[in-house]
């Protein structure tokens, strides 16, 4: 059974789920437990180093994953770097989502600008080193 572990702050869309199942042969999608999701989504910017801050999360991933499982990683750049390296070290496959972005701007009657953004999933890519 192949799993994907989600280290990001959103819910998967239907196209993302379909790609994971069809292209990557994922049988199980694993969201972070609530307390770990809170840690991942709230990396303290004032810490000089976040490696210790992520230890509980890395131990959880190591205990629950198997080599060749996927790990969808998006978030704080430093945390992503640490997690991608951790995955590579233990035979996990770190991936990230790519999107097409459509942006429109409208100047309102009061002179302010309203910006609308639409993101559409394109594909997952493996982190390469």
Image (spheres, grey):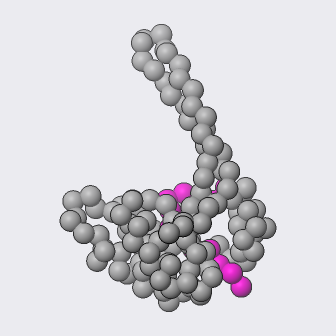
- Vertical position of residue 68 compared to residue 49: above or below: below
Residue 11 colored in magenta in the image: yes
Name the residue furthest right.
Answer: 22
Dominant secondary structure, magenta? loop
Is 75 left, or right, of 124 in this rendering? left
Q: Nearer the viewer, residue 126 or 106?
A: 126
The part of the chain drawn in magenta is 1-13
The residue that appears at 60% across and 39% down in the rendered structure is: 101
Is 113 left, or right, of 126 in this rendering? left
The residue that appears at 76% across and 67% down in the rendered structure is: 23
Residue 80 position, x and y percent, is: 43, 65
The residue that appears at 48% across and 10% down in the rendered structure is: 109
Q: Nearer the viewer, residue 97 or 43?
A: 97
Residue 34 position, x and y percent, is: 47, 71
- Vertical position of residue 68 compared to residue 8: above or below: below
Quarter of the image for residue 64 reads bottom right
Quarter of the image for residue 102 reads top right
Residue 29 position, x and y percent, is: 65, 73
Does residue 50 appear in the picture of this structure?
Answer: yes
- Vertical position of residue 68 compared to residue 83: above or below: below
Tell me the quarter of the image containing the N terminus.
bottom right
Residue 16 colored in magenta in the image: no
Q: Nearer the viewer, residue 88 or 72?
A: 88
Label total for image: 0
The residue that appears at 29% across and 70% down in the rendered structure is: 50
Q: Nearer the viewer, residue 97 or 45?
A: 97
Is 57 left, or right, of 118 in this rendering? left
Residue 83 position, x and y percent, is: 44, 72
Does residue 38 appear in the picture of this structure?
Answer: no
């Amino acid at each position: 059974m192949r799993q994907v572990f989600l280290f990001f702050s959103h819910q998967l869309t239907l196209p993302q789920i379909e790609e994971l199942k069809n292209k990557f042969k994922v049988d199980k999608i694993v969201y972070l437990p609530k307390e770990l999701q809170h840690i991942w989504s709230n990396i303290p910017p004032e810490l000089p180093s976040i490696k210790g801050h992520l230890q509980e999360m890395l131990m959880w991933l190591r205990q629950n994953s198997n080599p060749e499982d996927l790990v969808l990683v998006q978030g704080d750049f430093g945390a992503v770097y640490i997690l991608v390296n951790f995955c590579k070290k233990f035979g996990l496959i770190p991936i990230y989502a790519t999107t097409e972005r459509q942006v429109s701007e409208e100047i309102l009657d009061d002179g302010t600008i309203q910006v609308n953004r639409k993101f559409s999933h394109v594909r997952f890519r493996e982190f390469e080193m």
